[in-house]
Every structure is written in C-alpha cells, then in structure tokens.
Image (cartoon, rainbow, N blue to C red):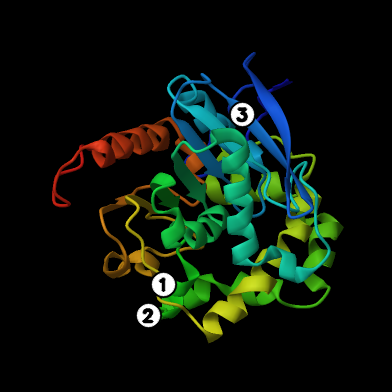
Amino acid sequence: MRTLRDAPGGGGREREAPVRDARTIERLDVDSDGVRLAVYVSGPRDAPPMILVHGYPDSARVWDGMRRELDTRYRVIAYDVRGSGASAAPRARADYRLAQLAGDLLVVADATCGAQPFHLVAHDWGSIQCWEAVTDPANAARIASYTSISGPCLDHVFRVRMSLAQSLRSWYIAFFHLPLVPQLVWRLGGAALWPWWLRRTEGVRAQRDPDQLRNCINGLQLYRANFIARARSPRERRTTVPVQIIVPRFDRYVTPALTADVAQWLGRHRRKIVDAPHWTVVRDAPLIAARVQRFIAWAKREEAPSAPLEQ
C-alpha cells in the first residue's frame, strides 16, 4: 500500500495544490507486452470501476485531487503511462504508437476490472491515446462511458482543416520533433522549472514531481511516434460509447475548434465548454469530478440522445 500523492499541475487563478491526506491506495505492477506499468487503485472493491489516464508531461499524480472526489463511489484506477512515473520506458519509438497505448489501457482494465465495464476519464495525451480504444468497435461493450478533456482524436483532427489559431498554438509539436534539442531543454532546467511554468501560466502552485525529467523526455516519443503518421493517413474513427468532451475555454494548447465537428463521429455525447485553462483537472478537480459523475448518470438512463444533461 502507498499513500495518495500530491498532484502536480493546474490552471486559472492561483490555488494551493491538494494537500496530502491519510488515504492509502494499492500499487500494482502490470505487464503490457513486456513493459511494466505502475497502477494505483483505491475505493470500494465492489464499486463501479473508473480508469483515469494522464497526459504529457504528467504522471498519475495529476489525478490525486480528482481521486479524492471520486473514490468514495467508484473503484478509481490510475496508471503511469509507459515512460512516465514509476512505469518502465521502452526504447523503441514504435512502442509508443497509439495501438500499443490502447493495448496498455486494456491490459490495466483486465488486471483491475476483469470483465466488468469501466468508465474512462482522460486528459491531454491520455485523452488522445484513449480515443484509439474508444473508437475500436471491439471495445464498445467494455467502456461504459468516456470523458475526454483537452485531448482530441488525432484522426478526427486531421480529417478537418486545422485553424490558424490552433496551428500557432501547436508550435511545440514541431519543436518536440527536433532531434536532441527538446531533450536538452528539459535537462538544462526545463523540467525543474515546470512547477514555476504551471504557476505562471495556469495559476496553480504545485510541488515538483520527482519523476518530472523522465516524464518530459520519454513522453516526447508520444508525439514522434504518432503525429506524422496520423497526419499522413487519418482514419475514419467512430464510436457508440457515450462520450463527454470537456473543452477548457482558456486552454493554451488545444482550441475549442478542434472538437467543434466531432459530433459526426459520435453516438450519444455531450460537449461542454468550461471557463478553465488546460490543467482544469487539477485546479477544478471537484467540479470536473462532479461533471464526470453527472454524465455517467445521464449515460446510464435509457433516454433518447436529445435528453438534456443536468448542469
């Protein structure tokens, strides 16, 4: 067992990072195609399972605030994506492709949920990679609901024209594809300054993640293994899984326009623009957790797709 850890990022007006509490969570090590994944589980064993998938350059720590809001009613499962936190980091770039990342999610689900359907919540790159699993028809009965925050499906993005505003905000993607330079920037102080950057641009004070440097460097492979391939050949990806898209209005990295046309690929869904920055999952953990729970309640009802979602 290990104690729930301090969460590292956020946005909006400055707030304290969540304070460490006495709650404990179970640590599991799960093997996914030869890569060890660190998985953290808390909440009642007989409660509905919910899997949380973090983005870049975070680890599962980013969910600590939301875990405190959710694990009284759900069996909350979060894991360090390959290359981050306490999970192992494969050497080959191909080992970070979307199909492999989707496989990681399902391996974690097998180990923690068994055959029981699970609710899925993801942020940033966690959301991007989870679309791969959500849009696979084989998983339609496995995923009970999906809440995507600041992470569109790459296939959807590249099947529509990207706006100039989004292109300008995505400058860092091209930077991350440069050889050696991004690694050098992170090593020469970028990783150490990350909490300062979050405080200055997102408004949350956060303690430094001890794994921040490896999160930053290993996570570059997420971009390098997937963006060019998807841009060259975007696929038609649809899903019947109930989907909630939470769109932070003041996101510095992902504009609302990226998900404006997503309805054509979805079944039952809701898209909500919120007055928040990119790391709303930390700054507004109670509010985002509440919205996730309301969406799950709506998705469970046998109502027409036009049924209103309670605000």
Q: Quadrant of the C terminus?
A: top left
Q: Which residue is mark 3?
A: 41
Q: Which residue is mark 1?
A: 156
Left or right? Give the position of 214 relative to 151. right
Q: Quadrant of residue 172?
A: bottom right
Left or right? Give the position of 58 relative to 162. right
Tag 3 secondary structure: strand
Q: Which residue is mark 2?
A: 160
Marks 2 and 3, how far apart at CA = 38 Å
Q: Is residue 224 visible?
A: yes
The single residue placed furthest to the bottom in the displayed view is 232
Q: Quadrant of the N terminus?
A: top right
Marks 1 and 2, how far apart at CA = 7 Å
Query: CB atoms at circles 1 and 2 under 8 Å apart?
Result: yes
Looking at the picture, does residue 158 appear above or below residue 272?
Answer: below
* Residue 227 x/y as whole percent: 59, 75
Q: Residues within 10 Å of mark 2 (few under 14, many from 20)?
A: few
Q: Residue at x 65, y 67 (%)?
A: 97
Left or right? Give the position of 150 relative to 196. left
Q: Residue at x 80, y 77 (%)?
A: 179
